[in-house]
Image: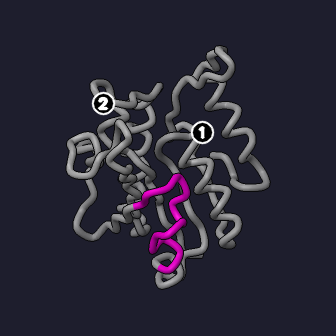
């Protein structure tokens, strides 16, 4: 079965000094670097997803340093970059058609933010008929707040990964 490594939103605004810093971001990026090396050695297709927000948002603004893909995992010319404008990497993008053109049926997913774009994309992948391996330690998230209560990033991470396990993805 043809596979692709899907790297979602590993962009500068998520790192220290960016406008939307995440927890565990460097650890996740180091795992992603290892996945990229493995994928290159195996000849696996590598797809980078890059999010661009509308101009009224505070991060991932088009043309800014924060919107750029991290230099430490920079795509090579043979890698595919797909721009998205929604949390779902399939919504109004060429991702599904690109995967079908390459006869890819299995996705190895990693990236940022676990509770938003990772979750949404993995769930959508099932709707499109893809098998998904989600690399849990190659994802990063943040503390969330509801009704004045802070939910620590570690809890957010475990909860979202657990909710995807089995039905939506194989967790590795």
Residue 155, percent from left and from top: 66, 24
Q: Which residues are magenta?
A: 84-97
The structure residue drawn at horizontal position 39% and vertical position 38%, both measured from the top left corner, is: 29
The structure residue drawn at horizontal position 42% and vertical position 65%, both measured from the top left corner, is: 42
Graded by Cα atoms within 10 Å as few (under 14), some (14 to 19) or many (20 or more), the crowding at tag 2 reads some
Reply above or below: 123 against 44.
above
Say which mark, if any, is on residue 18.
2
The structure residue drawn at horizontal position 67% and vertical position 38%, both measured from the top left corner, is: 160
Reply above or below: 45 against 34.
below
Mark 2: secondary structure: loop
Residue 35, percent from left and from top: 43, 50
The structure residue drawn at horizontal position 49% and vertical position 66%, both measured from the top left corner, is: 4
Residue 121, percent from left and from top: 58, 56
Q: Marks 2 and 1, Cα distance to the nearest angstrom?
A: 19 Å
Say if the magenta span includes residue 14: no
Residue 85, percent from left and from top: 43, 57
Where residue 49 sits, quadrant-wise, is bottom left
Q: Which residue is mark 1?
A: 115
Q: In the image as oriented, which residue stretches furthest toward the front? A: 56
Mark 1: secondary structure: helix
């Amino acid at each position: 079965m043809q596979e692709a490594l899907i790297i979602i939103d590993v962009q500068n605004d998520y790192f220290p000094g960016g406008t939307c810093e995440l927890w565990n971001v460097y650890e996740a990026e180091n795992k992603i670097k290892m996945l990229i090396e493995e994928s290159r050695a195996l000849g696996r297709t590598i797809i980078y997803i890059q999010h661009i927000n509308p101009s009224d948002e505070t991060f991932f603004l088009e043309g800014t340093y924060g919107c750029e893909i991290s230099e430490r995992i920079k795509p090579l010319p043979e890698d595919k970059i797909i721009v998205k404008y929604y949390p779902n990497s399939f919504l109004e993008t060429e991702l599904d058609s690109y995967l079908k053109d390459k006869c890819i049926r299995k996705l190895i997913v990693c990236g940022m933010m676990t509770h938003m774009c990772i979750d949404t994309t993995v769930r959508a992948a099932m709707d499109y008929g893809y098998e998904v391996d989600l690399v849990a330690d190659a994802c990063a998230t943040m503390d969330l707040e509801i009704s004045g209560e802070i939910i620590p990033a570690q809890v957010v991470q475990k909860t979202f990964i657990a909710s995807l396990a089995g039905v939506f993805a194989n967790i590795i």
